[in-house]
């Protein structure tokens, strides 16, 4: 029997409640300079208030929120981020830590603990580091918290093909496969909750969907500014799309999200 993490249950519930397959990438940030430390307190406060304003406009229209280092670093993991997670929780939305964990096991374990202890529901990790003494500790820690692990399978930027699409030759069988396909197979083997595949590569979404276990979600970033098309990603097999700049840089984020939701919900 497949165990469903709290993250998956929470995501599916919020998606149904808000009729949305859109995950907000809250990738806003600010620059804090060493020689202008007196300005830090106000800059961080203003950044938090901007995040709050965005969430207040669309919190009831999205399926989840993804937060990465652009926001985590200036706000501070133990300073403003817990308050931000509490704010997101008022809409019963899951929060994903987009930190692409990619280190040795004991370090990965502590990274996972720190992020899960303050309330993140899922972690994004890079499968390239491998299992034993690598991501085994991430999965082990996440399962103790009943949280999710999402593996990076194919990114959305132009240079992604240099690594994720490189051909790997099995030295024992001489079978050749692209790196992203091996990562998808690891997602099956390791029991990942989801994978990241860029919406800018719909054919790769299709290929990955055909390989993945049916219960594993595909989350597709790169919609909008990077050129990905949300509805096409969903038609290709994505479960959810991830959108950032097209939403929070919009003059009317609420209207933009409504339009995206409408286009996604029309996909059969």
Image: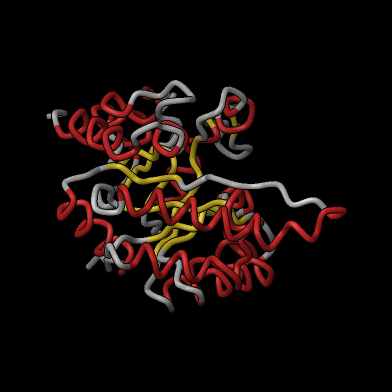
Q: Which of 61 and 161 lies nearest the eye of the viewer?
A: 61
Q: Within the image, what quadrant is residue 94 found in?
A: bottom left
Q: Residue at horizontal 40%, vertical 24%? A: 228
Q: Residue 202: percent from the left, percent from the top?
A: 37, 24
Q: Is residue 188 left or right of residue 82?
A: left
Q: Is residue 17 left or right of residue 141?
A: left
Q: Looking at the image, what colour scheme do you see? A: secondary structure
Q: Residue 148: percent from the left, percent from the top?
A: 40, 63
Q: Which of 52 and 123 lies nearest the eye of the viewer?
A: 52
Q: Is residue 158 left or right of residue 216?
A: right
Viewport quadrant of the C terminus: top left
Q: Is residue 80 left or right of residue 121?
A: right
Q: Residue at horizontal 50%, vertical 74%? A: 118
Instruction: Using the image, determine if residue 232 lies above or below residue 63.
Output: above
In this rendering, the count of numbered labels is 0
Q: Which of 95 and 197 lies nearest the eye of the viewer?
A: 95
Viewport quadrant of the N terminus: bottom left
Q: Which of 216 and 98 lies nearest the eye of the viewer?
A: 98
Q: Residue at horizontal 31%, vertical 29%? A: 230
Q: Residue furthest right?
A: 35
Q: Residue 249: percent from the left, percent from the top?
A: 46, 34
Q: Residue at horizontal 72%, vertical 59%? A: 40
């Amino acid at each position: 029997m497949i165990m469903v993490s709290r993250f998956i249950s929470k995501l599916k519930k919020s998606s149904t409640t808000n009729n949305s397959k859109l995950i907000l990438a809250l990738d806003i940030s600010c620059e804090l300079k060493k020689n202008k430390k007196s300005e830090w307190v106000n800059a961080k406060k203003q950044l938090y208030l901007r995040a709050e304003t965005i969430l207040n406009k669309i919190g009831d229209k999205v399926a989840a929120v993804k937060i990465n280092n652009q926001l985590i670093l200036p706000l501070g993991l133990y300073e403003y981020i817990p308050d931000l997670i509490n704010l997101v929780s008022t809409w019963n939305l899951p929060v994903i830590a987009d930190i692409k964990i990619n280190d040795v096991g004991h370090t990965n374990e502590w990274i996972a603990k720190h992020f899960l202890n303050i309330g993140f529901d899922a972690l994004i990790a890079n499968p390239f580091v491998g299992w034993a003494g690598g991501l085994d500790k991430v999965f082990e820690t996440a399962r103790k918290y009943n949280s999710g692990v999402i593996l990076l399978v194919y990114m959305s930027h132009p240079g992604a093909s240099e690594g994720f699409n490189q051909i790997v030759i099995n030295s024992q069988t001489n079978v050749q496969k692209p790196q992203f396909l091996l990562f998808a197979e690891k997602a099956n083997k390791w029991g990942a909750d989801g994978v990241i595949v860029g919406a800018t590569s719909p054919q790769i979404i299709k290929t990955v969907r055909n390989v993945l276990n049916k219960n594993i979600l595909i989350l597709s970033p790169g919609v909008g500014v990077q050129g990905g098309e949300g509805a096409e990603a969903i038609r290709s097999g994505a479960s959810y799309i991830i959108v950032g700049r097209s939403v929070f840089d919009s003059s009317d984020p609420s209207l933009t999200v409504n339009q995206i939701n409408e286009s996604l919900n029309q996909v059969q």
